[in-house]
Image: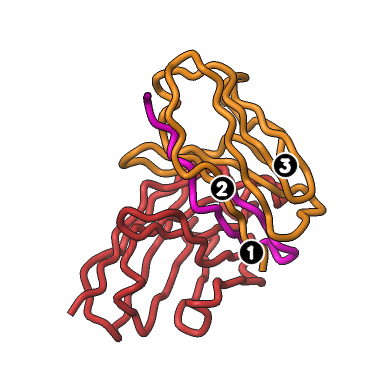
Amino acid sequence: EVVLTQSPGTLSLSPGERATLSCRASQSLGNSYLAWYQQKPGQAPRLLIYGASTRATGIPDRFSGSGSGTDFTLTISRLEPEDFAVYYCQQYDRSFRCSFGQGTKLEIK
Amino acid sequence: QLVESGGGVVQPGTSLRLSCTASGFTFSYNGIHWVRQAPGKGLEWVALIWNHGNDEEYEDSVRGRFTVSRDNSKNTAYLQMNSLRVEDTALYYCAREGIPGGYGLDVWGPGTTVTVSS
């Protein structure tokens, strides 16, 4: 079973700054089936990135994903006020069973 | 879109069936996941049913207690939850698997709340 570990647990930044969120897998994700989600309070998660680096439909280009193997990164180039939320990474196993990281809370400094 | 229903307050050991009704897309094309979120906690994947209902996957803690199914003629997926435990208390989401698979859960419902308490 692949375990995803996200860091940091909480990230405090100001609007306009760059955010870098990390997701580390306990085993190599050879297929790069790694996705990122944003969740705001009281809302369902929203798909941001799939395939480690492809933006989902309608996602602004300030969001970017990178990485392969065991180390993946979500970068938000210039934070907007609406970007402060909790972010989760997610992977698939060979049977398309999923697992999520524990989340990174991005808060306003 | 997806909309869940069927949540409620139940006692440990009892059963509940959740529904996930789809609109605005061809339901039979996509797998459907169930994901839950305990109060104040992160996301936990629960189960997956593929588009024609001929293959299912479960998270270990629910295997043997929960069963996923779907009726494509009704654009609805179901999560039958038996032998419920206090630790099953959560907001339950259904979410669409992107095509062709492995491309993320791209549509989510607002969720339905299940509370298991004596």
Q: Mark 2, residues whose alpha carbon is within 10 Å: few (<14), some, or many (≥20)? A: many
Q: Residue furthest left?
A: B118
* N-term-proximal mark, 2 vs 1: 2
Chain bearing mark 1: A
**Location of the C terminus of chain A (image quadrant):** top left
- Mark sitting on residue A97: 1
Q: Residue furthest right?
A: A30
**Would you place residue B16 above or below residue A11 in this image?**
below
* N-term-proximal mark, 2 vs 3: 2
Report the Cα–Cα distance between label 3 and label 1: 15 Å
For residue B49, side relative to residue B6 (left or right): right
Output the letter for the chain in orange: A
**Would you place residue B70 above or below residue A35 in this image?**
below
SS type, badge 3 = loop
Which hue belongs to chain B? red
- Mark sitting on residue A6: 2
Q: Mark 3, residues whose alpha carbon is within 10 Å: few (<14), some, or many (≥20)? A: many
Q: Where is residue B17? Give x, y as percent.
A: 36, 71
Closest to the observer: A54 or A27?
A: A27
- Mark sitting on residue A51: 3
Residue at 55% x, 57% y is: B32
Closest to the observer: B39 or B104?
A: B39
Question: Of the residues shown, which amino acid type is indicated by label 2?
Answer: Gln
